[in-house]
Image: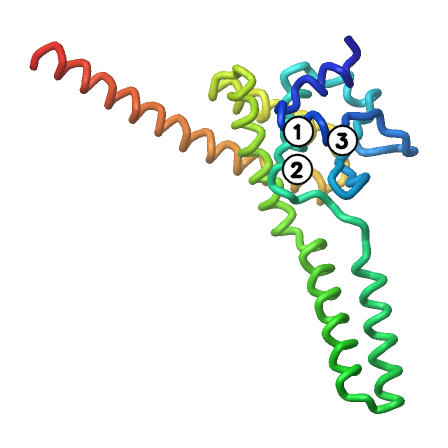
Amino acid sequence: MSELQRLKGQLPPEMQSWVFVEAAAAVDPPLITLEEIGRDEVEIQIDLEQWDNFALDHRNLLFWHEVGRVQNDTIPRDGWEMAALAIGLGGAIGELWVQDGLLLLMALGLSGFAGYRLYLKNNSEKRLQDAIAADERAIDLACRFNYSVPNAYKSLGGALKELVEQTRKKKKRSFYEDRLEALRKSAEKARAEMAEQEGSRQSVSSENVYG
C-alpha cells in the first residue's frame, strides 16, 4: 500500500468520497496543504519527499490536522478578494466622476467587504486560532482511530517540535511554537479531567463496596 493510499484510509468514512489525497506537484511545495478543487471537493496535497522524514505517528497527526481544517471549514479559498477590491475601488472612482450616489455606495460596500475579508485572511491571530482548533480536531480524530488521549497529544506534540526544529523562518517557527504551547495547555487540561474522572470512578467503586 502506498503512503497516499494509507492516508486515504485515515480519513473518516464520511469524508472519503469528497476529500482526496495527492502528491504535491508544485516546485518547492509546503509539507502538507489544502486546496479546494471543486464546489464540494477538497484535495490534501503532500510533499512526499519531506513527508517520508517524519515518524508514522507524526505523519498521522499532521494529516489529521489538515482534516480538522476541512471539518472546521477553514480551507484557504481562491483570492477573489483582491479582484473584488480592485473592482470596487475602480467602480467607486468611476461613480465619483458620474456622481451616481447609489452605485457609489454599492462600489464602496464591495470594496469594504473585500478589504475586511483580506484582513481576516492575513490576520495572524485568526490563523493561529484556526490552527489550534484544527489541532484539537486532530486529537479527536486520533482517538477515533484508536489512539489513546495521551498518545494522541504526544504524537502531535512531537510533530510540532519537529516542525519547529526544521523551520528557519522566524515568523513561521513562532507560529509552530505558539501551537505547541497551546497544545501543552490543552494536554494539561485533558490530564486533569481524566484524573478527576478516575477519582470519581474510584469513589463510586468504594461506595459500592462499603455501601
Q: Earlier in the sequence, mark 1 or mark 3?
A: 1
Q: Amino acid at mark 2?
A: Val
- Quadrant into which the C terminus falls: top left
Q: Give the color scheme: rainbow, by chain, secondary structure or one colour.
A: rainbow
Q: Which residue is mark 1?
A: 15
Where is residue 191? Give x, y as percent: 39, 26
Dots 2, 1 in contact, CB < 8 A: yes
Residue 40 horizontal side relative to residue 134, left or right: right
The one of 210 and 178 positioned closer to us in this rendering = 210
What residue is at 81 percent from the left and 50 percent from the top? 78
Dots 1, 3 in contact, CB < 8 A: no
Residue 130 horizontal side relative to residue 79, left or right: left
Where is residue 126? Give x, y as percent: 62, 51
**Whole-Å distance between the Cαs marked 1 and 3?**
12 Å
Query: Which element carries disc 3, helix, strand or loop?
Result: strand
Query: Which element carries disc 1, helix, strand or loop?
Result: helix
Q: Quadrant of residue 188?
A: top left
Q: Which residue is mark 2?
A: 70
Query: Which element carries disc 2, helix, strand or loop?
Result: helix
**Whole-Å distance between the Cαs marked 3 and 2?**
10 Å
**Whole-Å distance between the Cαs marked 2 and 1?**
10 Å
Where is residue 170? Give x, y as percent: 72, 42
Q: Amino acid at mark 3?
A: Ile
What residue is at 79 percent from the left and 27 percent from the top? 46
Residue 95 horizontal side relative to residue 111, left or right: right
What residue is at 75 percent from the left and 64 percent from the top? 114
